[in-house]
Amino acid sequence: MSQSPREVNDRENVRDAMDRRDFLKTGGILSAGGACAYGLPLIGALASGAADKEERPGRRKWGMVIDLRKCRHDCTACVEACRQENNVAFFGDDDVENHERWDIHLIRKVTIRRKYPIESAEKSVPVLCNHCEDPPCALACPVAATYQREDGIVICDQHRCIGCRYCLIACPYNARYFYFKEDEDWPNQDRPRSSHGVTHSCTFCVHRLDRGGTPACVEKCQEIGAGALTVGDLNDPESEISKLIAENDVKAIREDLGTKPKVFYIGL
Amino acid sequence: MKINRGVIAVIAVLIILAPLGYSVLSAVVGPGGQQAEPFLEKPENASKCVRDTTYMRFHHMDYLRELRNDAVRRGIRGEVGLFSCRECHTSRERFCNQCHEAVNLNLNCFRCHYYP
Amino acid sequence: METNFKTIEGKSPQYYMLAAVLALLILPGVYATWVMFQHGLYHSGMTNRIPWGLQIILAVFYIGASAGSLVISSLYGIFGKLEYKPFARIAVYLALWFLIAALLSILTDLGRLDNLKSSFSHFNFLSMLSINPFLYNMYILICIVYLWAMLKEKEKAVKVIALVAVIWAILVHSGTGAIFGFVPRELYQSALLPPSFISAALSSGTALMILVILLLFKLTKRPLDDELVVRLGRLLGIFVCIVVYFLFVENSYRVYLAESREAGLHFLSLSGESGVLFWGGLVLLGSIVPAVVLFHPRTGKSIPWIAFASVLVVFGVLCERYLIVIPGQTHPPDLFPGMEIVGSPLAEGVVHYTISLFEIFQAVSVAALVGFAFVVGLRVLKLAPTEARLHEQPTSA
């Protein structure tokens, strides 16, 4: 016996309605379950990550203080020293047309002046990687090639870097650079020259710091007599840098972003 | 149909075995076949390496990798590093490359780290 | 009403010509990728200020199109609307290949592809760029299983897998939105980016499906009921409205708050780089014109008009992807609030992005690959339906 079309329709509607309810139920459970399965450990990891970076007694934490009162306006000694020490790519003389696109500036001198409310005098500010306590670049790196070491230095391990450039996107200070092109020059053959395809940022010359030395920029600045840069252990209350911070009014760039940068300026 | 499948099977086998044949031929007949065993130049200024020969022969890559990760990721830089090797083994061409080129195991470390 | 799926004949000279042309178009991108792998990415238009360019824009577009196509297939798979069953298999097949295209776009853009193995052994699971490939890989698996279930006509399995697939597609594309939204740059940082991406995915996926369906049925000369396309067109119109809504909320927010006002106004201003593309490309041509066409009683029922609207929507979503990725990089971060930067060796102000030839090669290549895979898939697998007609209602008792 065939049923009337209307009965068939009704049954189909009822079946659809049942399917819809089932769908909502399963859908709801699956989504909630998926969210918990994925979200909760994530929240836990983020929270514990923050906790790991707390001060531990006996641990070093490298920071930098830049005294803008001593920084000379047209001087680029720190830039040259860094470039020389770290074989930083610079195409200025070879490729005048394109050098701005691919030059690396691990440390750069930025000239600023107040524009609001009135234009003020110009000031020259060295800008470099701030080695943030809560680095967005390290959070972004998919392979943990960019990560924060226990001594507070944020470094890109170029052996592991896959060149995705997400850390360049994530850094709110424009302090990270990518080797779009290899530089032919190799001024300092004791140090590696980066190949193309990896990210580079200031490492506080960690190869020197680890052996008790000072970064190239700091050394050069002392050499020329300015002494505007100081690198030291923020965890050591007796260190020069701790005293500078305690006695002066220091400020970091965009501290409001919450990244907790560790490069402080006097006179910014 | 039988003949077709057989022909295809024979051609497929030949294609698969061709690289093997090529390497056998080139090892026996070509310049690779004439090459002598790698000659590792012994350093003049030292008689002992930081580790013994057997360990180095089997584990030098792991050793170097551990040194690298300790230095870069943990900040532990001791007496021995990548360039400690250079103090005694002065030429990569006459030492490392001898074996590495013979077995065609390319290193990309020295694209960035200077070691001629 | 039974839907029969049949492979296409695929023996005509036109078919072979199409497949050959598509296969040839894959070559320029292979060449470009090889050169850049050997010598560096400086051949592209990207710079230290603009590290992500056309490849990433297209990757985001493809992921959106993939998620959108899957929603079309879910019209049958989840909601059981039999009239859309004819399109379900093509939709899933395209969803699969769009995502493969997205992954290829990302992979060919990496600086050190030879270091990729480190991404499997050392995994920072907090990074959006590692969460997302995990989602993408699982999504590919789910699509393959979904396609297999449909080809083997396992109806019950299809229902379950369709649900999982759609939920996963939403996760995938929200994840893509989070790559940009969860980053502290003025024109990126936004909680609205994940849902906004989903809305753009729905509209671009639907538009692409309409175009593919029209082209497929026209070229294979199989019967297609116009009413089905009209319904899809109406759906597309709704999706376009949702996209406009998200655009409106995002931009109002940026302009309203003092913190982001300068960046927001610069983004919208016609004298800036992005203004013309935003107002002309995305809002006018990409959203308002298609919405009007699709909702107007006369044009909304005409197939050529719907196709025209779909093309405009695809163009609009491409503009939107460009406007999401590029202005966030060209607009500088405000390093010294209240100050202005008068000199620096790095380009600190607003910079300009030009698309290079090599990037275009790569883009064409990936698109040709999807086309080739689709054309071959139609011949090899039972993807295309013999006909697509509306479900015939019985007339009287």
Image: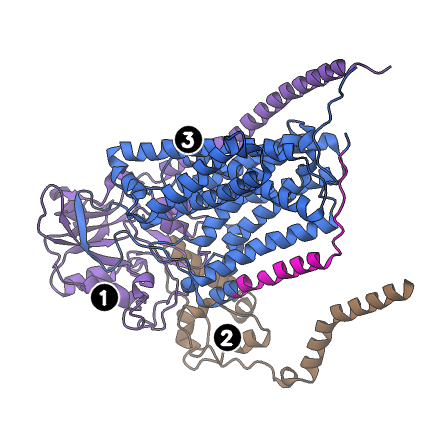
Residue at the image position 73 percent from the left and 26 percent from the top: C392
The kind of secondary structure element at disc 3 is helix
Residue at the image position 23 percent from the left and 53 percent from the top: A127
Mark sitting on residue B96: 2
- What shade has chain B been given? brown
Mark sitting on residue C295: none
Q: Are marks 2 and 3 on the same chain?
A: no
Q: Nearer the viewer, mark 2 or mark 3?
A: 3
Q: Position of residue B8 (x, y in %)?
A: 82, 66
Give the Cα distance between marks 3 and 1: 51 Å
Q: Which chain is blue?
A: C
Q: Are marks 1 and 2 on the same chain?
A: no
Q: Nearer the viewer, mark 1 or mark 2?
A: 1
Q: Is residue A253 above or below residue C111?
A: above
User: Which residues make up the magenta segment?
Assistant: C3-31
Inspect the image, locate mark 2, and give the three-letter code of the amino acid beneath it: Cys
Give the Cα distance between marks 1 and 2: 35 Å
Give the Cα distance between marks 2 and 3: 64 Å
Magenta-highlighted stretch: main secondary structure?
Answer: helix
- The residue pinned by badge 1 equals A80
The C terminus of chain C is located in which quarter? top right
Question: Could you classify mark 3 by the number of other residues whose Cα lies within 10 Å: few (under 14), some (14-19), or many (20 or more)?
Answer: few
Q: Chain of mark 2?
A: B
Asked if residue C361 shows in the view, the reply is yes
Q: Chain of mark 1?
A: A
